[in-house]
Image: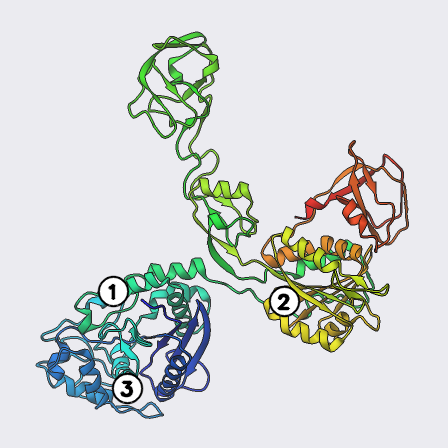
Amino acid sequence: MKPFDTVLVVDWSAAKTKSARPQKDAIWFGLARAGRIDDLQYHRSRIAAEHALSDLFRTEVAAGRRLLACFDLPFGYPKGFARQVTGSDDPLVLWDWLEARITDTPTGDNNRFEIAESINALFPGPGPFWGKQTQSAHPGIPYRKTGVRFPGFAERRETDHLARSASSCFQLAVPPTVGGQMLTGLPVLARLRRREGVRVWPFQDWRDAPVVLAEIWPTLVDRSARASGDPIRDRAQVRLLAQAISRLPPETLSRLMETPPVAREEGWILGGGHSGVLEDVLSSDMPLTPPRLKNDCFALPPGVDWTPVDDALARLRDRLHCVVGREDVALSEAGGRILAADVMALRDNPPAPNSAVDGYGFAHAAIGRGDQALPLVQGRAAAGAPYSASVPMGYAIRILTGALLPDGVDTVVLEEDCATDGDRVAFEGPVKRGANTRRAGEDVTVGQVAVAKGTRLAAPQVALLSAVGVEKIAVYQTLRVGVLSTGDEIVAPGATVDASRTYDANRPMLLQLLRDWGFRGVDLGHVGDDREALKAKLNEVVSGCDAVLTSGGASAGDEDHVSALLKEAGSLADWRIALKPGRPLALGIWQGVPVFGLPGNPVAALVCTLIFGRPALGVLAGEEWRAPVGFEVPAAFRKSKKPGRREYLRARLTEDGRAEVFASEGSGRISGLAWADGLVEIGDAAREIEPGDPVRYIPYASFR
């Protein structure tokens, strides 16, 4: 089957024209492409909805997109009804019969009750249509269902029984008014199906048609609709059902569109009896889009001048949240990804009691103190080849590591502690009950959280999830971080330069950091000291990024255009942080995307990125806030530090475990970054450091 590019779900209504304000029990359109909702429409009247449908069909065909248009009304009546009304079993003949008789107006006035009354006159006894707004109106229509007959056909179709809760095609009033929806909706479908390229499932050959009309029932995703919290459930249902159908693999959708022979006359509910499939594709594969950060999320309190490092980190931690959606991936492809939900164990690990060693197993109750000798049963227990019989009391069995404990065995003695002649085994007692065995679930029990949400998966987590039977997991989409260099003095490595120009070290450094951290670095190139060019570049690239790192232009000088643009956008928080190297950190929001304006000096850019960027980006990506792990080591240097600023020195450990620091503290000395393997952090207060004094050392690896 050729896949559908677009899925439309329509919740139809037989009610009169509604107000301009969106409300329930009205006509709603949900349009999805590639599993995401593309449009959500409210229509006040059936006339307006029909015009919108005609335009949509025309647009999709012209664009070369294949459309599956689904409607919340039965496409057919129970087997036998159409013949008694039209003389034909073809349900499309009945569509045309109704289209020739039903009238409708822009105000919603129609003659559906009169037509239903005329159909009832074709049958003996009361019915089959029943239900009306007042007892005195339309004497040919029973007020209640009591006594109504359905001569020559059933009240419900086979698909209605399969869907369990679908309502009767003959109920005209008192919700649910499915009968009224059919009488007002089928004439519209009759006109739409006459358009070129439109086919009706399952009545016609629809496999290659550009537009396919299908019957659905939005209540199939009612669980998700109720959980959505949308006060207008019709709106939630069309949105979620359109998404669910759009996400189904073509082979799954094709299977759901297979129907029994009776469907060629009665119609069929797409997905009827398969609500679980649709709910599952929503719950497990819904690319939830978190809310964007607010423009003022980085704002500092009035009067704040210098921001201590700890205060700055606390503010970031409080104001950031995950900004990426989620997706399902196979565990085999999940290394390095961040879990979007807790993963529960699907089985115990170990799944059953087994031996931890090669040795001999027996019932502990059969032994005592002193030397022990037990006869051996024939055979052995091995991993993957269990011993199927029971081991009698007072007997032992040869057992290998990982083998399931046979019935009658609860204790194992290590092979090296035994002597055997092939018929008996001897060892020294006493032996502790349960020795050298593993209990079922002693590692992880079924239903227990095996790995928690927010964990970045490495080899150990992949091993654990594999052991407890997990094949597919929900992960966050990989954070896309744009990296942009600014400044007229910057040129790309390899370019011809004079002494006034500098090769760009920041952008390659930051892109490599992002790769090391498991994020997707997006190279945004370089922009000179041109405010309009920088603005145009941000406008161009921001839609493809979840966050942006810029270097240079973050202070308050004439050429600090990053700060100036963020200020114009009303989102600048010019954080003057009390740290060295560094100090200026321009934080802001550009079209909903957080921008971290880093200093231009490479050493300061790296330190600010490690200390502030790493934990902040982790939260944006779905991780928990991660503070780097440091530890105290003896200093291999002298340092006199003034109060007021926290300092980070490029450092590395000596062979005897002391921290030595780079000879220069200059922010332009990039060689010190390559020389070091971490940072020494010195607190805000004044300090005199002598060799041997304890200092806090943070290895670069701690930021991964």
Is disc 1 surrounded by few (<14), some (14 to 19) or many (20+) residues within 10 Å? few
Residue ID at (41%, 75%) = 30
Residue furthest front in the image: 496
Label 1 SS? loop
Give the tally of numbered discs.
3
* Residue type marked 2: Leu
Left of 228 or right of it: where is 591?
A: right
Give the foreground label among 2 and 3. 3
The image shows residue 99 at horizontal and vertical percentages of: 23, 88
Of callouts 1 and 3, the N-terminal one:
3
Could you tell me if residue 570 is visible in this image? no
Q: Which of 170 and 450 is in front in this view?
A: 450
Residue drawn at (31%, 70%), measured in percent from left and top? 217
| Quadrant showing the N terminus | bottom left
Mark 3: give few (<14), some (14-19) or many (20+) Cα within 10 Å.
some
Q: Which amino acid does label 1 sit on?
A: Glu
Query: Mark 1 highlights which residue?
Result: 258
Q: In this view, does 552 lie to the left or right of 198?
A: right
Q: In the figure, residue 538 lies in which quadrant?
A: bottom right
Above or below: residue 579 compared with residue 413: below
Which residue is tagged 3? Answer: 191
Q: How far apart are marks 2 and 3 (CA)?
A: 47 Å
